[in-house]
Image (cartoon, grey):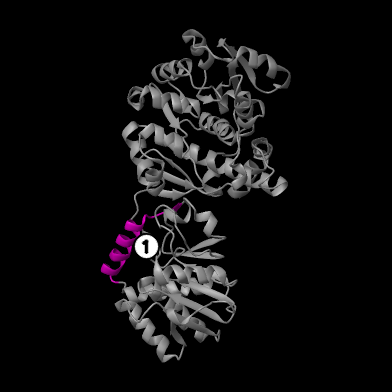
């Protein structure tokens, strides 16, 4: 379980380490050493430095490259440097390392490797002037690029950028930051690693979900068990217009493949009739319907969820007054784990999130940015700039587990937060969210006492299955069903993680 620190928390952690007796100059040396060890250094190397502490890491790096006999030079924004950075710049001058100013560089072509040490994680805003020009020159260089701490121009908290360095490797210093996983991070970083420089983290409980963490939700099964041990669950949704959604969640066995004991597929009667020949492992529960959509009947819905540990509602249900009635009923009456997705979320936004405060059971919400915007009344741009704290605040204030979908998925109950960065652009296709809902329901049915962990593990499984599918059929051609078919391999990977 690897902790992630916000930019502010990293700054406080750094200050605390210095106050406890580790000089900033020493921390800078450790950072430079970590970057040096992690990088692939093909001479000649250009170390492109700004004026902050990130530049100091670059000066240490240049000094170490010189000692290793690797030809390098430093490109400076100007002669300014922090106190600790200035010390290491003086060392570089004494070693005879060539140093020139940015303004003297018209191109960076011809370098084997480039170290991006322009901005650190404290950067915010938009690179301008010479900084923007140097970022462009780095991206046009054709060199192997290593970014120190985070890609210059990328926000350390949101992962957003107007323009930023595109790296082959990013070496985070001290601890991971949210911007290494969220927003546009994957578009700017081909690979990333983190170097520990001995700073005790002062975080608030944000962690990176990996295979080892997800595997804890899938312990070895006991011989003395049965299907009820792993949970009965209900998947409720579907309509004539969106018949594929509920089929992806259940008929394609997304839930069964993720470990559920028994899946009860609840859909409008005419849809059940069409799916009956294809349903083998799941059971069917036909619902009353009106014009191809579910028609709310209280006793019917009560029977549909009876005896289940978890129920997912909304996939392909369509937005109507009947859908809203169903959401109101489930929130008021169902005492299991209720996952609201898609039209279930839209119905909740219409009915009002204050209903969450009186919910009978445990609630998991799975919005994408647009759905979260409707739930909160906040603009999508505002959410994208500050997704972590907004997700945590919403979960804490409403007593729910929130899974905010994105290239980096945030899962939080307001006290503990996971960030999962598995997945592929090929999953940006219809039905991917429906598959995820089926997986969440299955993992939560088996782990009803660990819902935040279970939802995050489900996000990992879904993302890894999507990656496996992309390796087979390609990102452009893959569809949600390919992710479903890859679930066994993704879950099998968790068994290897336990070894």
> In the displayed structure, would residue 445 be above or below residue 455?
above
Predominant secondary structure, magenta span: helix
Residue 468 belongs to the span the image colors magenta: no
Does the magenta portion include 6?
yes
Residue that carries the numbered disc 1 in the rendered image:
123
Q: Nearer the viewer, residue 468 or 498?
A: 468
Q: Identify the secondary structure beneath mark 1.
A: loop
Q: Which residues are magenta?
A: 2-21
In this rendering, the answer to whether 362 lies above or below 382 is above
On screen, residue 340 versus residue 399, left or right, reads: right
Where residue 141 appears, x then y in whole percent?
57, 72
From the viewer's side, name the closer residue of 322 and 488.
Answer: 322
Out of 488 and 244, give the one closest to the viewer. 244
- In the rendered image, is residue 5 in sight? yes
Identify the residue at horizontal 40%, vertical 57% (top origin). Answer: 156
Residue 1: image location, x then y, percent: 47, 51
Q: Position of residue 313 (x, y in %)?
A: 51, 24
Q: Residue sitting at 33 percent across and 22 percent down?
A: 358
Mark 1 packing: few (<14 Cα in 10 Å), some, or many (20+)? some
Q: Where residue 257 sits: x, y (%)?
A: 64, 33
Tell me what residue is drawn at x 46 percent, y 35 percent. 367
């Amino acid at each position: 379980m690897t902790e992630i620190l916000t930019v502010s928390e990293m700054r406080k952690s750094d200050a605390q380490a210095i106050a406890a007796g580790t000089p900033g100059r020493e921390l800078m040396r450790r950072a430079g050493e970590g970057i040096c060890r992690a990088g692939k250094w093909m001479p000649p190397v250009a170390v492109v430095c700004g004026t902050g502490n990130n530049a100091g890491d670059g000066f240490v790096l240049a000094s170490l490259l010189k000692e290793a006999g690797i030809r390098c030079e430093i490109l400076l924004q100007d002669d300014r440097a922090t106190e600790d950075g200035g010390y290491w710049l003086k060392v570089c001058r004494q070693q005879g390392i060539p140093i020139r100013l940015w303004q003297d560089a018209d191109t960076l072509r011809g370098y084997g490797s480039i170290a991006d040490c322009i901005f650190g994680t404290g950067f915010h805003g938009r690179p301008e002037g010479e900084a923007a020009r140097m970022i462009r020159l780095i991206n046009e260089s054709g060199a192997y690029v290593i970014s120190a701490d985070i890609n210059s121009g990328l926000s350390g908290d949101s992962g957003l950028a107007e323009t930023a360095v595109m790296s082959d490797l990013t070496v985070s210093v001290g601890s991971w930051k949210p911007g290494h996983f969220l927003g546009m991070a994957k578009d700017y970083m081909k690979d990333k690693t983190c170097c520990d420089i001995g700073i005790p983290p002062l975080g608030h409980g944000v962690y990176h979900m990996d295979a080892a963490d997800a595997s804890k939700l899938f312990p070895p099964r006991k011989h003395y068990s049965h299907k009820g041990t792993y949970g009965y669950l209900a998947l409720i949704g579907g309509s004539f217009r969106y018949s594929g959604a509920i089929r992806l969640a259940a008929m394609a066995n997304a839930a069964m493949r993720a470990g559920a004991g028994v899946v009860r597929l609840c859909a409008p009667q005419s849809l059940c009739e069409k799916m009956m020949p294809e349903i083998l492992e799941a059971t069917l529960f036909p619902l009353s319907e009106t014009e191809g959509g579910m028609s709310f009947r209280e006793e019917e819905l009560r029977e549909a969820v009876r005896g289940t540990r978890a129920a997912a509602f909304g996939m392909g249900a369509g937005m109507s007054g009947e859908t809203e009635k169903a959401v109101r009923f489930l929130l008021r009456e169902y005492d299991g784990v209720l996952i609201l997705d898609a039209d279930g979320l839209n119905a909740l936004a219409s009915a009002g999130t204050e209903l969450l405060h009186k919910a009978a059971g445990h609630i998991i919400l799975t919005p994408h940015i647009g759905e979260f915007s409707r739930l909160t009344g906040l603009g999508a741009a505002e959410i994208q700039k500050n997704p972590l704290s907004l997700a945590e605040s919403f979960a804490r204030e409403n007593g729910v587990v929130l899974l905010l979908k994105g290239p980096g998925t945030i899962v939080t109950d307001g006290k503990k937060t996971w960030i999962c960065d598995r997945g592929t652009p090929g999953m940006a296709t219809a039905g991917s969210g429906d598959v995820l809902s089926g997986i969440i329901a299955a993992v939560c049915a088996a782990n009803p006492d660990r819902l935040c962990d279970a939802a995050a593990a489900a996000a990992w499984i879904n993302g890894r299955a999507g990656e496996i599918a992309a390796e087979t059929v390609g990102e452009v051609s893959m569809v949600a069903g390919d992710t479903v078919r890859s679930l066994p391999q993704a879950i099998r990977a968790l068994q290897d993680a336990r070894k």
